[in-house]
Image (tube, rainbow, N blue to C red):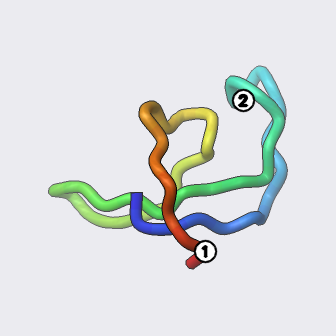
Amino acid sequence: MLCWVDNQWVYPPYSNYASNRWFRVSSAVGTGYVHSSLVANQTSVGHC
């Protein structure tokens, strides 16, 4: 996790819980945003 933003709300069943929080994440295939309900083992990061 690189940072977070509050943007589009997503609700179940499209997420595990209702939230507008998204995390910017980086992997071997690129960088992008993932809904907070899909990120396990969340750590403290700053706002993007």
Mark 1–mark 2 Cα distance, whole angstroms, equals 24 Å
The residue closer to the viewer here, 36 or 41, is 41
Q: Answer with mark 1 or mark 2, whichever residue precedes in sequence.
A: 2
User: Could you tell whether 2 is left or right of 28 in the image?
Assistant: right
What residue would you read off at disc 2?
14
Q: Residues within 10 Å of mark 1 (few under 14, many from 20)?
A: few
What residue would you read off at disc 1?
47
The residue closer to the viewer here, 42 or 11, is 42
Residue 29: numbered disc: none
User: Could you tell whether 8 is left or right of 1 in the image?
Assistant: right
Q: Residue drawn 56% across and 78% down? A: 48
- Quick check: 36 above or below 30? above
Q: Residue drawn 80% across and 25% down? A: 12
x, y percent for residue 5:
66, 68
x, y percent for residue 14:
72, 29
Please name the amino acid that badge 1 sits on: His
Q: Residue drawn 43% across and 34% down? A: 41
User: Could you tell whether 19 is left or right of 28 in the image?
Assistant: right
Please name the amino acid that badge 2 sits on: Tyr
x, y percent for residue 26:
31, 61
- Quick check: 35 above or below 15? below
x, y percent for residue 24:
48, 63
Q: Nearer the viewer, mark 1 or mark 2?
A: 1
User: Could you tell whether 44 is left or right of 29 in the image?
Assistant: right
Q: Residue drawn 50% across and 55% down? A: 44
**What element does badge 2 sit on?**
loop
- Quick check: 9 above or below 32? above
> Which residue is outermost to the bottom?
48
> Which residue is outermost to the left?
28
> In which quadrant of the rendered view does residue 32 lie?
bottom left
